Image: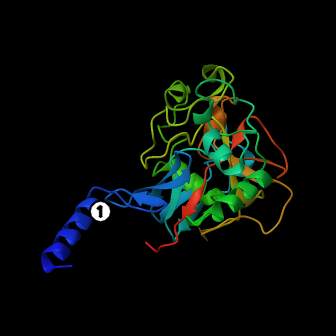
Amino acid sequence: MTQRSVASAVCIGLLLLSANVVSGRTAGDASGRERRVDLGSGEAMRFVWIPPGSYVRGSPAGEAGRGADEGPRHEVTLTRGFFLGVHEVTQAHWETVMGRNPSAFRYGVDARRRPVDSVSWEDCARFIARLDGRGAGRFRLPTEAEWEYAARAGSATRFPWGDDLQESETHAHAWANSRSYAVTHPVGTKPANAWGLQDMHGNVWEWCSDWYGPYASGPQRDPSGPASGTERVFRGGSWYDFPVSLRSANRHRHRPHGRYTAVGLRLVWEPEEKR
């Protein structure tokens, strides 16, 4: 190859990279803030980078609708950033990986774009194992601390859109109760939070990796919940729930083998390359 040919090839390569045309299983935008993971069959998952930082987890004693397990409030520091799904895992994602769709709401022209539902925590572990075998990095459920940090997106109010004490704004931001019409809805149809995440509140609850247990008092670094337990945590509220259940601090849990029409998942992606 001549020097002119080499130079031309280098220029073409740089142009392709600047246009974000990246070969292989993953691709990211120019800033590296959002990435896509190809699943095949025309399906891909989108992930957004959540930076490390600190926040106050839980709710103050006077918060409307507060549950007793939302305290004591304590500072949490996450020392490592992470890529979190822009929205929940969809029925199309699940079926592409697992070959079947367990969702109760799997009928209708838009069903494949709705979040997968009726999956247990154990089902999610099997889904993640299949994804890990595809060579596109590692996947996992978020910890409960990561989930609340991402849901709050820098806010300290009941919801990321404010305290909304009359809960009159909830339906503009999330699929919940009467305005959901008793079904799930295609992901990404409500506004994103400040960090570019959609459907963190409503549509379906989202499993976390933690066993359920009381919060420890005092500051914590990278908490991952109790070492053992009988129930796993899920967060965020759903199409079935009243707005109070969609608060950022609200916690819920079920046994890991249980399947529910209001529960799905969102994933963390850990790329093979280092940031």
Secondary element at tag 1: helix
Residue at 32% of width from left, 60% of height from top?
31
Q: Quadrant of residue 87?
A: top right
Which residue, as the protein is rendered here, is positioned at the far front?
1
What residue is drawn where x is 75% and y is 31%? 104
Q: Quadrant of the C terminus?
A: bottom left
Observer-nearest of 92 and 227: 92
User: How many numbered dots are placed on residues in this image?
Assistant: 1
Residue 60 in sight here: yes
Specify few, some or many for label 1: CA neighbours under 10 Å numbering under 14, 14-19, or 20 or more: some
In the rendered view, would you say 61 is above or below 20?
Answer: above
> Horizontally, is 29 left or right of 141 in the view?
left
Which residue position holds label 1?
Answer: 17
Q: Position of residue 124 (x, y in %)?
A: 73, 53
Query: Measured from the top left, where is residue 227 in percent x and y?
Result: 79, 69
- Picture layout, residue 207 above or below residue 105: below
> Is 48 positioned to the left or the right of 63 in the image?
left
| Nearest the eye: 34 or 180 | 34
Q: Is residue 18 left or right of residue 91?
A: left
Q: Position of residue 170 (x, y in %)?
A: 54, 29
Q: Quadrant of the N terminus?
A: bottom left
